[in-house]
Amino acid sequence: MHTACAVPAAIIRPPVQIRQAGFFLTGVRRLRWNLISCGRHARSGEAVDKKAKKKILQMIPYGAYVVGTKTKQGTDHLMFGTWLMQTSFKPPLVAFALSEDSRTLANVRESKSFAVSFLADGMYGVAEGIVDGSFKNVKTERTPSGLPVVAGAAGWIDCRVLEISEKGDHRIALAEVVEVASGPGKLMPLDALKWHYGG
């Protein structure tokens, strides 16, 4: 049985702007938010429903990216990835989540840098080739710093690592964008590949 969630009477009135957490919400929108926040959720100490968790987290939209790094020996290395987000305007910062046992993470720790290619719509073969480890079949170019990026991509960013978060089974590389370039086409969403990485 669910406990009824009381909505303050002061909220049920014609729309009035209310400042909350830095945002302006109308009375109607705030009422809707109160109703949503009263929905079913796991209580403290209870296990989260695994199926529901996976379903919801897989709703987070991702793009198709290729992370370019160099090994200690100077060899190019490419990795297909999805967990990229911007975290700051000034300076321009991004965060990329890298699996704790990946070669890419080891390279990033060593060089303190990485590049991200934004795969364009239709670059299915490139994505599949990189996932399969067939780097030789992927045509690449270089950023001014010498990192490999995918030729013909929708764009790329060259990043200088500021810090790496050690929490979870992925490490979060926080980096400043130091160079960018745009190319033809639009970013290919992960859904276009019918792949999922999340949950």
Image (spheres, grey):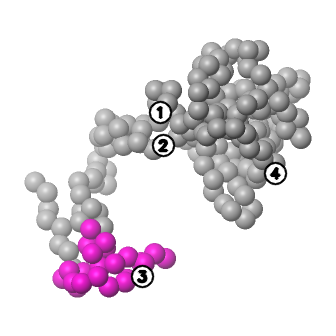
Amino acid at pointer 1: Asp
Spatial CA span between label 4 and label 1: 29 Å
Mark closer to the observer (2, 3): 2
Spatial CA span between label 1 and label 3: 37 Å
Q: Are marks 1 and 2 in contact (CB under 8 Å)?
A: yes
Q: Earlier in the sequence, mark 1 or mark 2?
A: 2
Quarter of the image with the C terminus in it: top left
Specify start and end residues of the magenta stretch as a single range: 9-32
Q: Is 50 rendered above or below residue 30?
A: above
Badge 3 element: strand
Spatial CA span between label 2 and label 3: 29 Å
Bin the neighbour count of mark 2 within 10 Å (Cα to Cα): few under 14, some 14-19, many 20 and up.
few
Residue 18 colored magenta?
yes
Residue at label 2? 61
Q: Earlier in the sequence, mark 2 or mark 3?
A: 3
Residue 186 in the image: state x and y as whole percent: 61, 40
Q: Earlier in the sequence, mark 2 or mark 4?
A: 2
Residue at label 3? 19
Quarter of the image with the N terminus in it: bottom left
Bin the neighbour count of mark 3 within 10 Å (Cα to Cα): few under 14, some 14-19, many 20 and up.
few
Q: Are marks 2 and 3 in contact (CB under 8 Å)?
A: no
Mark closer to the observer (1, 3): 1
Left or right: 33 with respect to 12?
A: right
Q: Nearer the viewer, residue 116 or 57?
A: 116
Bin the neighbour count of mark 4 within 10 Å (Cα to Cα): few under 14, some 14-19, many 20 and up.
some
Bin the neighbour count of mark 1 within 10 Å (Cα to Cα): few under 14, some 14-19, many 20 and up.
few
Residue at label 4? 178
Q: Are marks 4 and 3 in contact (CB under 8 Å)?
A: no
Amino acid at pointer 3: Arg
Q: Residue at x 79, y 26 (%)?
A: 140
Badge 4 element: strand
Q: Earlier in the sequence, mark 4 or mark 1?
A: 4
